[in-house]
């Protein structure tokens, strides 16, 4: 794999794990005075690894 592809794949996986941690620990995040619902991290946990897998698979060809 190219170095940039490897770095992006790794960062997507780390991002996903951060969202999983937020889901497990129920960490509150406030943006501009508004509370971001914890359930939104479910999308942040599912979508980045899918993108990482697709990027990894495309790069293998």
Image (cartoon, rainbow, N blue to C red):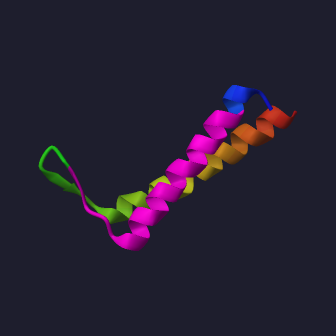
Q: Assess whether residue 13 is covered by the magenta stretch.
A: yes
| Image side of residue 36 versus residue 41, left or right | left
Q: Residue at x 48, y 63 (%)?
A: 20
Q: Residue at x 33, y 70 (%)?
A: 26
Residue 17 in the image, given as x and y percentages of width and height: 53, 58
Q: Magenta stretch: dominant SS?
A: helix
The magenta-colored residue range is 6-30
Question: For the image shown, how many numbered marks are present on the structure?
Answer: 0
Of residues 14 and 42, the one drawn nearer to the viewer in this rendering: 14
Residue 9 in the image, given as x and y percentages of width and height: 65, 41
| Image side of residue 29 versus residue 3, left or right | left
**Displayed quadrant of residue 28:** bottom left
Of residues 27 and 45, the one drawn nearer to the viewer in this rendering: 27
Looking at the rendered image, the quarter that the C terminus falls into is: top right
Q: Assess whether residue 54 is covered by the magenta stretch.
A: no
Looking at the rendered image, the quarter that the N terminus falls into is: top right
Residue 16 in the image, given as x and y percentages of width and height: 53, 54
| Image side of residue 48 versus residue 25, left or right | right
Residue 39 in the image, given as x and y percentages of width and height: 36, 65
Residue extending furthest toward the left: 33
Eyeballing the image, is 7 above or below 34?
A: above
**Displayed quadrant of residue 37:** bottom left
């Amino acid at each position: 794999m190219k170095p940039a592809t490897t770095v992006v794949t790794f960062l997507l996986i780390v991002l996903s794990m951060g969202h999983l941690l937020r889901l497990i620990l129920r960490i509150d995040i406030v943006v501009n005075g508004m509370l971001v619902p914890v359930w939104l991290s479910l999308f942040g946990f599912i979508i980045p690894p899918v993108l990482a897998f697709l990027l990894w698979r495309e790069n293998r060809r």
